[in-house]
Image (cartoon, helix red, strand yellow):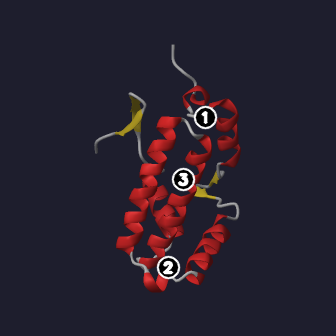
């Protein structure tokens, strides 16, 4: 028996459907961000108002990302849906700030990553996508 994607999703079928409903759509090989650019700008505005860009740096943001990663791992192990969502959101905020502090934007990171993965081939092995060797 193979579990469906919804059954493997950590918080059940309703959460999986919400996940599917929230995915961006793809057309012509590029992502349609559905207002995400504005969301990222809101994050940058929030961070700027709090001095993260004048008093922080990529090292402090990386440490924060590791902290949030630990919170995500704990949420998955405890099957805590609220903390799962919170940790992922916090990680996106930290990555947005890290990109800004590094002189780029998270939108550029996402576009660059998508250009690479959109052409990637491979297969699923033990629940993990393993890319083909070139």
Q: How many marks?
A: 3
Are there few (<14), some (14-19), or many (20+) residues within 10 Å of tag 1?
some
Q: Position of residue 76 (x, y in %)?
A: 50, 39
Measure the C-alpha gap from mark 2 to mark 3. 19 Å
Name the residue at 61% across, 55% down: 28
Q: In this view, does 2 lie to the left or right of 34?
A: left
Q: In which quarter of the image is residue 66?
A: bottom left
Which part of the image, by quadrant, shows the C terminus?
top left
Which residue, as the protein is rendered here, is positioned at the far top? 1
Sequence order check, earlier mark of 2 and 1: 1
Are there few (<14), some (14-19), or many (20+) residues within 10 Å of tag 2?
some
Task: Check disc 3 and report the residue beneath it.
Answer: 88
Name the residue at 49% across, 69% down: 108
Q: Do the residues labelled 2 and 1 touch (CB within 8 Å)?
A: no
Task: Check disc 1 and report the residue beneath it.
Answer: 11
Secondary structure under tag 2 reads helix
Measure the C-alpha gap from mark 1 to mark 3. 14 Å
Q: Is residue 72 left or right of residue 39?
A: left
Name the residue at 68% across, 48% down: 22
Relative to 5, does residue 104 appear above or below in the rendering? below
Q: Where is residue 112 in the image (x, y as percent from the top left)?
A: 45, 63
Q: Are marks 2 and 3 in contact (CB under 8 Å)?
A: no
Sequence order check, earlier mark of 2 and 3: 2
Q: Is residue 1 left or right of residue 124?
A: right
Name the residue at 48% across, 82% down: 53
Secondary structure under tag 3 reads helix
Which residue, as the protein is rendered here, is positioned at the far left? 134
Q: Position of residue 81 (x, y in %)?
A: 60, 41
Nearer-the-camera pick, 3 or 73: 73
Q: Residue 52 got which mark? A: 2
């Amino acid at each position: 028996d193979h579990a469906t994607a919804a059954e493997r999703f950590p918080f059940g079928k309703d959460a999986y459907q919400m996940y599917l409903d929230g995915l961006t759509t793809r057309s012509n090989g590029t992502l349609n961000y559905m207002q995400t650019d504005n969301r990222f700008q809101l994050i940058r505005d929030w961070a700027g108002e709090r001095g993260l860009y004048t008093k922080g740096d990529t090292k402090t943001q990386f440490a924060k990302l590791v902290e949030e990663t630990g919170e995500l791992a704990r949420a998955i192990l405890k099957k805590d849906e609220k903390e799962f969502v919170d940790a992922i959101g916090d990680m996106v905020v930290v990555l947005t700030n890290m990109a800004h502090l590094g002189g780029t934007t998270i939108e550029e990171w996402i576009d660059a990553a998508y250009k690479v993965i959109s052409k990637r081939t491979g297969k699923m092995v033990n629940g993990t996508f393993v890319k083909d060797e070139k």
